[in-house]
Image (spheres, rainbow, N blue to C red):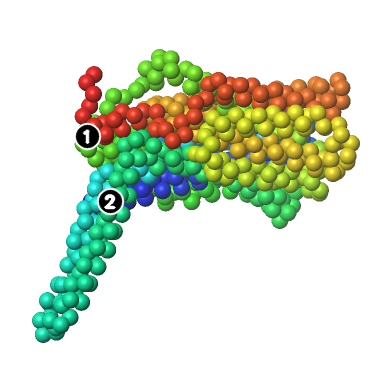
Amino acid sequence: CDSEARLRQRDSAMNRKLLISAISNLSTAYNLVIINVSHVTIAYQYCGGADACSAQVEAASTAVLVGAILGQLTFGYIGDCVGRSAALRLTMALSLFGATISAAAVPLGGDSSSVLTFLALSRFVLGVGVGGVYPLSATIATECVHRPHPAASSCRLHRAEAEAAAESRKPRTRALSDPSRYDPRQDHTHTAVDAQAHTTALRHAAVETTRLFAERTRTSAGRSSSNAERGRNASLVFSMQGVANLAAPLVSWALLAVFGVPATGSGGADPGLAWRLALALGALPGLLLVPCMGEGRGGQGGGARHTADERMSAPIAALRAEAGRPAGPSSTLLSTLRQRKYWSKLLGTAGGWFLFDITSSGSRAVQAAAGDAPPLQGDLAHNLCAQMAVVAAIGLPGYYVSVWLMDRVGRRRIQLQGFACMAAAFAALGLAYDSLESAGAGGRVAMLLLYGLTFFFSNFGPNSTTFILPSETFPPEVRTTLNGFSAAMGKLGATLGSSAFKPMKDGISAAWGPAAGLRWTMLACAAVSLAGFALTYGFVEDRRGIAMEGAATAREEDNNGGASAAP
């Protein structure tokens, strides 16, 4: 049937979009994490130490965050105007360009530290690209759901009935097709075979009819499999960031082992192949996606019809297109923001992301000890790559626990327990720091493992839920715009945290000692986590199993057979 063929084609396109979104997230996370190791390597190679050009390193780090904020705001709006897929192609092109240029960084003048100025400019371009991936990939992941199609269900029902009728006629037709072999004495045998075949076929048809009826009932009730799998799809897409968080330090570690750590103060005399290749690999996912992103661009209907359908939730657009109904009234950004019901929702999505990213900036407080040589070799206590890999490995399972429980426990509960457990882990780390530090290498390893738990509960918590919530909370016409705004608030929180925590830690350390500096930094992270818990409790709703915002109208039209309510 044509309807079932179109359904399979649509599901194939959705799977391709999910794959593109997942690889885009992998690219984004890798490019954001890999620079943490590269900055250390470059600072020692071109400046003679991490403290010699700390201002330039901080400027390069800030540039990518500023670029990400701009990309989230800009491409969130572009995604609502021209479609998610088209905007995602553009963001990946910018990411590919920024990663490639970063690998070619050289001093801009006689000052060797100006290589970080070059890096800041290229990382800004990269930041715009990776920032745009956040709202677009999240929205694509939540909109790409496999919703049962009523026309396809009817088609399968009719086909099952036809097959049952054909099956019931097979034995008698075969007996009469060759009269020379017909034996009247076996007529009772054929009659028994006919009855048995007919009964079996009718039983299969009844089972299929019952299944299709239940499927259509679930769809009309608004709690279809599409709503049940929405959180899982988005969590799977986002989990690729966890893979990248682990891959980045391991790739850097391997490249440094192969090509060696550049000598301190060597400048341009050492090509720095390790950090250049590590940065260049950030362009690889984008290159691999080029064939996939080119598929399906032709023959999609083109023009305004396809653009409008892509801006809406994919299942809603498909149902309306199938029925020949218009897309319905659209929402604009200003008209949406005028509605008070969205104020608290925006505070919940943007505020939760803002507070979470402040706590994630506390990772700067736990790092390898800096000395005369780059902290990139040796034991765990003095190897930044090893520390990052251990923390990422501890946090990685949190992504997949979220995948498993996102549609069972719900977004709100997962975010609440995540903030609560993060607050407990940060507080334990701060209060027990003196005891762990005095325990030597074993205590430092224990401290690192405890800190890794904050990543586990952030991934099985607000890091995953803040990615999903904006995409299912706002109307489809402004979905990526407000998703981008929420993500931008997260990067603003990261900028605030990175600019506040380190000076606070250094100031307290100078006055009361290094132990006091780290202890109060961890306690501050615990306090911010508690604020995130309170904000989630008051302003975050759980849309688990409920149709996405803006889908109700389409569902009502579908249930009423296409009749529209009077205005």
Residue 34 visible? The answer is: no
Q: Which residue is mark 2?
A: 209
Quarter in which the C terminus is drawn: top left
Residue 318 image position (x, y, % from top left): 29, 39
**496 left or right of 480 in image:** right
Q: Residue at x 23, y 24 (%)?
A: 565
Q: Which residue is mark 1?
A: 561
Element at badge 1? loop
Give the distance between the C-alpha atoms of the residues marked 1 and 2, in whole angstroms. Answer: 21 Å
Residue 233 image position (x, y, % from top left): 47, 43
User: Looking at the rendering, which quadrant does residue 297 occupy?
Assistant: top left
Q: Nearer the viewer, residue 451 or 47?
A: 451
**42 left or right of 475 in image:** right
Q: Residue at x 61, y 21 (%)?
A: 534
Residue type at the position of mark 2: Thr
Question: Which residue in the rendered view is the most extreme toward the left?
Answer: 179
**538 left or right of 543 in image:** right
